[in-house]
C-alpha cells in the first residue's frame, strides 16, 4: 500500500514525475524567499504579488494564447510594476507599503480576471487561477528549474546583505545608502520571478501557499537562520511529495492537495513545535 501510494505513480507515469520535479524545485527556492519575507514581517506581500501578476499573465494570454513565454514575461513585468508603484506610494504618501500593496493587488486581481473573461473560457480562467500541475510539459519544467537555480545562486551571493537588511537596515543605510535599495529591488525581482514560475504549476492564487506555509511552520521549530532555511526547504519538499501522492491516491486536485498538506504541517507545528507557546501552555 505504501509503495503503491507514495512511489509507484512517480515511477510509472511521466506526467507525475514532471509534476514532482517541478514541485520539488519550487519548494526549495520559494521557501527560502518565504523565510526572508517572514523575517521582514512582510508575509502577506507574497500573496499580494501573486495576485498582482495576473493582469500581465492575462495580457500575455490574450496576445499569444497559452504561451508560457508570453504569460511569464507579462506576469513578471506586471509584478515589477506593482512593486515599484507600491514603493513609490509608500514613500510619497502617509500609507505604509503593506497598505499600498493591498490597494494595488485587489485592483490587479479584478483587472486580470476581467481581461481573461473577455476572450477566454471558465476553463482558461481556472487554469490561470489554480494552475494545472499534472499538465506541466518539459518546457515549463525547465523554466521552473532555471528559476530555482538562479534564485539559489543569487541568494547565496547576496546572503549577508539580505540578512543584514532584514535585521539592521539602519546600519546598511549609514554605510552605503544605495545598498538597501539595491538589495530590496533584487529581493522583489526574485519574489516576482518565483511567483511567475509558480503560477504555471499552482496558479496565481495557490503559488504563495508553498512559499509561506513551510517557512512559517519552520519558525515554530528552529531558532537559528540556517536551521530555519534548512527546515523550511525540507518541509516544502516533503509537503509537495506528500500532497502529490495523496492527490493521486484519493483523486483530489493536485495543487490544493499540496497546499492543504502544507497547511496541516503548519497546524502541527503551531501545536507541537518546540518554540510554540501553545505547546508550553498545554
Image (cartoon, helix red, strand yellow):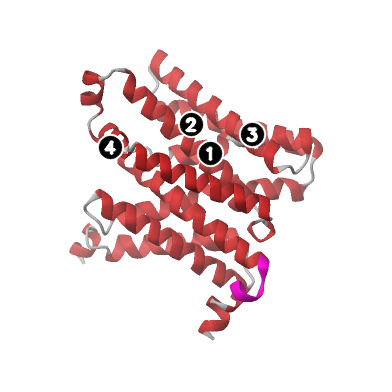
Query: What secondary structure is found at the residue carrying circle 4?
Result: helix
Magenta segment = 9-14
Q: Which residue is mark 2?
A: 102
Q: Could you tell me which residue is drawn at 53 percent across and 42 percent down? A: 195
Q: Which residue is disc 1 drawn over?
A: 193
Of the residues tagged 2 and 1, which is closer to the observer? 1
- 257 vs 132: above or below: below
Left or right: 81 in relation to 137? left
Residue 212 as seen in the image, left or right of residue 134: left
Residue 11 is inside the magenta segment: yes
Please tell me which of labels 1 and 3 falls first in the chain.
3
Which is more foreground, mark 4 or mark 2? 4
Residue 189 image offset from top left, x and y in percent = 48, 33
Circle 4 packing at 10 Å, graded few (<14), some (14-19), many (20+), is few
- Residue at disc 3, secondary structure: helix
N-term mark: 4 or 3: 3
* Picture quarter with the C terminus: bottom left
> What residue is rendered at 65% in x and 32% in y?
74
Mark 4 or 2, nearer chain start:
2
Q: Main secondary structure of the magenta part?
A: helix
Q: CA distance from mark 1 to mark 3?
A: 9 Å
Q: Residue at x 45, y 61 (%)?
A: 237
Q: Is residue 15 magenta?
A: no
Image spot of residue 276 (x, y percent): 24, 58
Badge 3 local density, few (<14 within 10 Å), some, or many (20+)? some
Amino acid at each position: 500500500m505504501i509503495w503503491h501510494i507514495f512511489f509507484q505513480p512517480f515511477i510509472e507515469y511521466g506526467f507525475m514525475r514532471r509534476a514532482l520535479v517541478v514541485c520539488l524545485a519550487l519548494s526549495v527556492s520559494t521557501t527560502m524567499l518565504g523565510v526572508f519575507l517572514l523575517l521582514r514581517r512582510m508575509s502577506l506581500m507574497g500573496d499580494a504579488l501573486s495576485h498582482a501578476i495576473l493582469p500581465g499573465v492575462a495580457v500575455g494570454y490574450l496576445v499569444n494564447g497559452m504561451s508560457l513565454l508570453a504569460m511569464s514575461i507579462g506576469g513578471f513585468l506586471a509584478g515589477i510594476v506593482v512593486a515599484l508603484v507600491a514603493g513609490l506610494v509608500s514613500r510619497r504618501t502617509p500609507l505604509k507599503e503593506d497598505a499600498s500593496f493591498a490597494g494595488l493587488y485587489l485592483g490587479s486581481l479584478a483587472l486580470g480576471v476581467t481581461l481573461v473573461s473577455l476572450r477566454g473560457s471558465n476553463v482558461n480562467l481556472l487554469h490561470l487561477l489554480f494552475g494545472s500541475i499534472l499538465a506541466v510539459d518539459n518546457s515549463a519544467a525547465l523554466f521552473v528549474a532555471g528559476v530555482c537555480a538562479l534564485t539559489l545562486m543569487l541568494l547565496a551571493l547576496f546572503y549577508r546583505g539580505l540578512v543584514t537588511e532584514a535585521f539592521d537596515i539602519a546600519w546598511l543605510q549609514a554605510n552605503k545608502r544605495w545598498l538597501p535599495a539595491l538589495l530590496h529591488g533584487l529581493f522583489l525581482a526574485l519574489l516576482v520571478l518565483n511567483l511567475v514560475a509558480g503560477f504555471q504549476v499552482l496558479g496565481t492564487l495557490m503559488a504563495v501557499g508553498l512559499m509561506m506555509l513551510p517557512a512559517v511552520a519552520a519558525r515554530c521549530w528552529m531558532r537559528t537562520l540556517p536551521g530555519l532555511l534548512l527546515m523550511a526547504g525540507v518541509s516544502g519538499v516533503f509537503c509537495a511529495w506528500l500532497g502529490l501522492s495523496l492527490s493521486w491516491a484519493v483523486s483530489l486536485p493536485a495543487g490544493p492537495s499540496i497546499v492543504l498538506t502544507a497547511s496541516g504541517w503548519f497546524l502541527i507545528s503551531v501545536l507541537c513545535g518546540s518554540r510554540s507557546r501553545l505547546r508550553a501552555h498545554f
